[in-house]
Image (tube, rainbow, N blue to C red):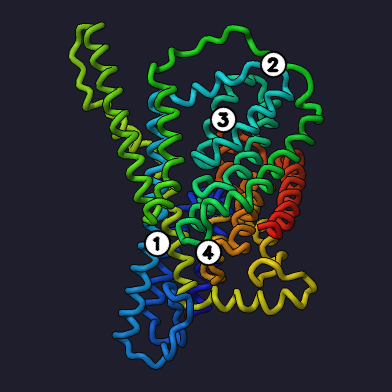
Amino acid sequence: METIIILVFVFGYLAITLEHSIKIDKLIPALVMMAVSWALISLGIDAFPQWFDSAKHTLLENFGALGHEEKMHIMEESLLHHLGKTAEILVFLLGAMTIVEIIDYFDGFSTIKGFIKTKKKKNILWIFAILAFILSAIIDNLTATIVLISILQKVVKDRSVRIWYAGLIIIAANAGGAWSPIGDVTTTMLWIADKVSTGKLFLYLFIPSLLCMIVPTFIASFLKPFQGNLDIPDEVEEKPKNRFSSTMLYLGLGAIIFVPIFKVITHLPPYVGMMLSLGAVAIFAEIYTSSRFSMAQVELGEQIDSSHHSPIHRSLSRIEMPSILFFLGILMAVAALESLGILFGFANTLQDTMPRMGTEMHSGGVSDLVVLLLGVGSAVIDNVPLVAASLGMFSEPLDNELWHFIAYSAGTGGSMLIIGSAAGVVAMGMEKIDFFWYLKKIAWLALVGFIAGAAAFMVTRTLF
């Protein structure tokens, strides 16, 4: 039965990886393999000799000798435990996505365009790279990529040049997301699971992540596409900016930054702080919206029902529900493998075999090669299940260097292929970037940055 469940996961995982080839949204195989895996566990519960207690991170003793009803009770408790942990991540993401959509409702991100005052291609490259690095640490790398490519489309009209900028934005956004607990889904997963803390994450990963962004950007600045000036009209017609745009931008970003502070002060799960931040931003959004419609009523002499223009309702209708359902499916599918002790056994096998391959052991007793391979693997397949699997495989304590290295590798390794990260996939869709063009032109830059950051991490971990 275990073999069948593993095969279900493998085929489901393969369908996720080949999403663009088979034309099936990745959330579908994720949800199917989750449901089928747990159904098979329920139907064959008496055939399993072992069970992994995720709360205590150890195998249960004498599980095979227990009665059917007791085994079913343990399975239901495990399912509820994993659903609770997954729900923490999903509710957190829902809150963050809604705040970002509220900012967009007030056209807040148009304020960022005002930072671009130059026509030099090289300077614009650095502006976008730095903005991607900073923004992704606050609003996550996926959203930062969407925002910056949207601005890029208004600044750079030549698509053949613009896709080069998009490639470097992907690298910078993934690098920026790695050192922030709210910058990347995988880092958020490690943070919510109490594997990394905000302070240590910054200490360990800021310099490696910065180098992962700076090195490729520096090399790219000497390449032909970034030489000379852009042909930007002096006067570009823009739609009138909402008068609350800057206020809502800074309020929304500040509210998201407040979440890690709230967690440190109260020791409550991060989603609680995110809900508080969402509530605060929503209050101002409703006040500003009511004020705006009141002004419109006076100017137009018309009655406008502001209840039909609620920024909260609109923002909630625009969040990426397919992504939320994908995370639900993939995390719960990985939880099925964890509960059967498969991931635990795989981790022990890795730790036993890797030292014999001559690799040095540093990260919590786990070979650096294992973590680096995880980074390379995240470029080929999705990094979310890889990190979810690592949470089930390893039992190192809070802020062990292993977790920080995993956060860096999984977060930045995906830049090496355009399908290797959410930022890359969304950029691919927005700019119709060809897979092989990215592989030829950008992948080597991402690899150089990844190696530079990994080398820097191996140095910084000895300092803290």
Q: Residue drawn at (53%, 34%), measured in percent from left and top?
A: 146
Report how far apart the C-alphas of labels 1 and 2 lie in the structure.
Answer: 48 Å
Q: Residue drawn at (60%, 74%), measured in percent from left and top?
A: 347
Name the secondary structure under disc 1: helix
- Say whether residue 424 is visible: no
The mark found on residue 398 in the picture is 4
* Front residue (pair 456, 2): 456
Mark 4: few, some, or many residues within 10 Å (few <14, many ≥20)?
A: some
At label 4, the amino acid type is: Leu
Q: Which residue is mark 1?
A: 85
* Front residue (pair 323, 367): 367
Q: Are marks 1 and 2 in contact (CB under 8 Å)?
A: no
At label 2, the amino acid type is: Lys
Place residue 116 in its image quadrant. top right
At label 3, the amino acid type is: Leu
Viewport quadrant of the C terminus: bottom right
Q: Are marks 1 and 3 in contact (CB under 8 Å)?
A: no
